[in-house]
Amino acid sequence: MDAIASIDESEEVQAGRSGKGPLVYRQNRWTRLTHWIWALALFFLLLSGLQIFNARPQLYIGKESGFGYNNTILRIGAEDTDRGPRGFTEVLGYRFDTTGVLGWSGPPGNERARAFPSWATVPSYYDLGTARVIHFFFAWALSATLLIWLLAGLFNGHIRRDLAPRSADIRNLPRDVADHVRLRFHHTGRYNTLQKLAYGGVLFGLLPLMILTGLAMSPSMNAVLPFLNEVLGGRQTARTIHFTVMVLLVLFFLVHMVMILAAGPINELRSIITGWYRTDPPGGGTDATGRSE
């Protein structure tokens, strides 16, 4: 890896003359492959999951739900009003008009009651059976890939070397936050502190929690792992946590895209497609952590 990631002295001189930094081999093949498998799996999990949610567009806290309970924390629906049918989203008892997007949507003149609109679900028409097949397929694909990545990362040192925050990372956290707020990026070929924390939070927090809550909602898995449902507070609570994790993953994706555009999309895409990453020009005044001095 060190031999691949390094470049010879003549290349560094040429890069310095051109005003560009050297290329380093930042992402190995397995990292790039799993990245795109996860991206594809999460895309279909999101759209098929919204279709499944449409079958019961409410979230609860607790082990049971129904007319005799008052534990609803989210509800998306439609109602008849003086202005005609209107869509609404109710969060913790506060209701918002979301006509055209949530609750009531569709082509003009052909609107219908629907929690999430057709363009945001797979399939676009209501088909719970197909949505569940798609959802479960990509859920197992994601789980298997994540498990293999975790074992490989522990074996080859990728997690310890590239993702585990060090004491220097923690000390540099305030400075790193300030640099990101000012959209000031340092292209060093290594993950900065915020990247380590964000990727670690997703890979070791959100994705495992999404998998566990998904298993807790499965009646067949309840027979295999009966304690899982109890630990998570019941099937309805697990469903609410599952939905919340989905929202957090969508927010992570949006921030991830903004950071890619701000840091240089061509360089970032080249890194995750080919593995090669353009670093800052040599002699740019960076310290041992890759930051400008």
Image (cartoon, grey):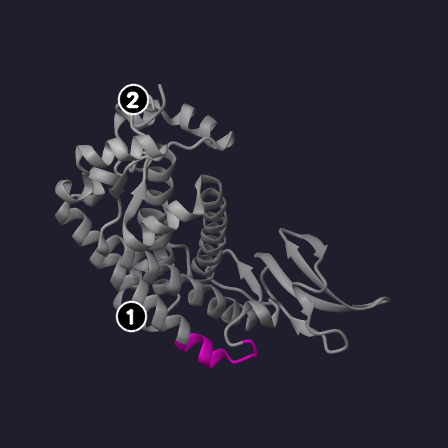
Q: Quadrant of the C terminus?
A: top left
Provide the residue span drawn in magenta.
Answer: 124-133
Q: Nearer the viewer, residue 270 or 133?
A: 270
User: Which image quadrant for residue 136?
Assistant: bottom left
Residue at the (43%, 58%) spot, across then down: 238
> Could you tell me which residue is drawn at 22 percent across and 52 percent down?
150
Helix or strand or loop: what does disc 1 sit on? helix
Q: How far apart, in angstroms, are the residues tagged by discs 1 and 2?
A: 55 Å
On the question of residue 63 being in view, the answer is: yes
Q: Position of residue 66 (x, y in %)?
A: 57, 67
Is tag 1's residue or tag 2's residue first in the polypeptide sequence? 1
**181 to the left or right of 222:** right
Q: Residue furthest right?
A: 82
Q: Quadrant of residue 267?
A: top left
Q: Which numbered mark, 1 or 2, is in the foreground of this view?
A: 2
The secondary structure that most of the magenta stretch takes on is helix
User: Please, what secondary structure does the residue beneath circle 2 have?
Assistant: loop
Name the residue rendered at 51%, 31% in the picture: 181
Q: Which label number is shown at residue 6?
A: none
Q: Residue 21: image x %, image y %?
A: 32, 35
Q: Is residue 81 above or below residue 31?
A: below
Q: Say what amino acid the circle numbered 1 marks.
A: Ala
Q: Nearer the viewer, residue 71 or 281?
A: 281
- Residue 287 is marked as 2
In screen coordinates, is 240 left or right of 191?
right
Q: Residues within 10 Å of mark 2 (few under 14, many from 20)?
A: few
Residue 289 percent location from the top left of the image: 28, 26
Residue that badge 1 annotates: 223
Taking depth in this image into account, of 225 and 146 the one nearest to the observer is 146
Above or below, comparing residue 258 to residue 58 in the picture: above
